[in-house]
Amino acid sequence: MMKKRAYFKRRSVLVLAAVILIVVVMFCLRGRKDTDTVSVPLGVEQAAIVTYSGPSVSVAPYKWGVAVNVRIAEVIEREGRRIYDVRYIVNRAGTFDLKDYLVAEDGSALNGLPTFKFVGDPKLSKNLDTRIQETEEVRVDVGGRYYETMIVLTLLWIGWLLLLIFYKRPKPPAEPDAGPPAPTLAEMLRGFLAQLEAGTLDATAKAKMEMTLLQCWRNELDLGHVPMGAALDQMAHNSKISDPLKKLQHWLYHPASTVQSAEIAAVIAPYTHETKLMEAAPAS
């Protein structure tokens, strides 16, 4: 009886040890599988660092509907090896190996290229979409009619600025008074004639009277564009002006001149009327 109990007890211990061993082995295998395979969400770019000492590596030609999109972001050259920064996006659920999407640039086999397995997990993608949606829904609402208030304040500021610029703005100064118009040739000659008759015509007035008469004769003969020397020559050869010109010059420049003041007054008198000067002036 004692031997039978010892046998069952020993058998129970062996069975318990076997169960514990099986559980430990399963746990180790599961942990190793989880370590060797990475779960990634669908549609989100991931990164992997691949170190390889073989031929130069590039991405396999793209195929329509491929499960994984792969690109090489950067290649770092090291002595005897290359370090590849590989980016990949999983498009559908399943287990994939990154090395299946890499090829040698020279077409040779990639012997010794490390395996990098990953699983496209739709559950992670759903959780990611939820997180993005929750983030997008976060917003800051500004109350108190903020935008309407800003528009009103902007309009008030513009109105205030316009008032500063234009309200009670000083008027531009008026143009200075040009003064009385300059006397006409006829008015000047009337003044000289009055001084001549009164005997108050001095040397300065005589010179001005001469220049005024010469100007009248230039206008009469249309000699405004001719130099004074040539104009005097034409006046001296004009039958109408030559005699009054000789009298004027003899009276002005010869101290013992026999020309009387009355004769000079007769020369001036016809040009003291505006109508006479307008008839003598050339047509413009």
Image: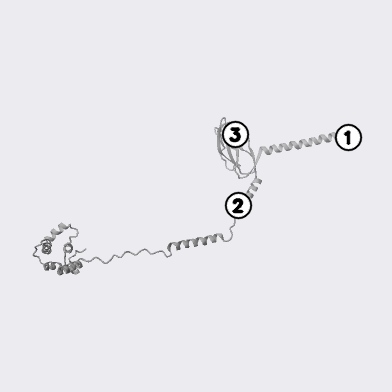
Is 177 situated left or right of 242 in this image?
right
Left or right for 42, reference 282: right
Instruction: Please say whether residue 213 is visible from this viewpoint.
Output: no
Q: Residue at x 79, y 35 (%)?
A: 18
Q: Quadrant of residue 52?
A: top right
Please state the horizontal and vertical placement of residue 227, each as a whole percent of the image: 17, 57
- Residue 5, labelled with which disc? 1
Distance of label 2 from label 3 (alpha carbons): 38 Å
Distance CA(mark 2)–CA(mark 1)? 70 Å
Q: Amino acid at mark 3?
A: Thr
Q: Secondary structure at mark 2?
A: helix
Tell me if label 3 and label 1 are in contact, CB under 8 Å: no
- Please, is residue 82 above or below residue 143 in the view? above
Q: Nearer the viewer, residue 178 or 261?
A: 261
Residue drawn at point x = 86 percent, y = 33 percent: 7
Furthest-right residue in this view: 1
Task: Identify the image quadrant of the C terminus.
Answer: bottom left
Would residue 223 appear left or right of 164 to someone viewing this image? left
The quarter of the displayed image where residue 175 is located? bottom left
Q: Which residue is mark 3?
A: 51
Mark closest to the chain's N terminus, 2 or 3: 3
Q: CA distance from mark 3 to mark 1?
A: 61 Å
Query: Tag 1, which secondary structure?
Result: helix
Q: Which residue is mark 2?
A: 136
> In the rendering, at what x and y percent does residue 254 appear?
10, 61
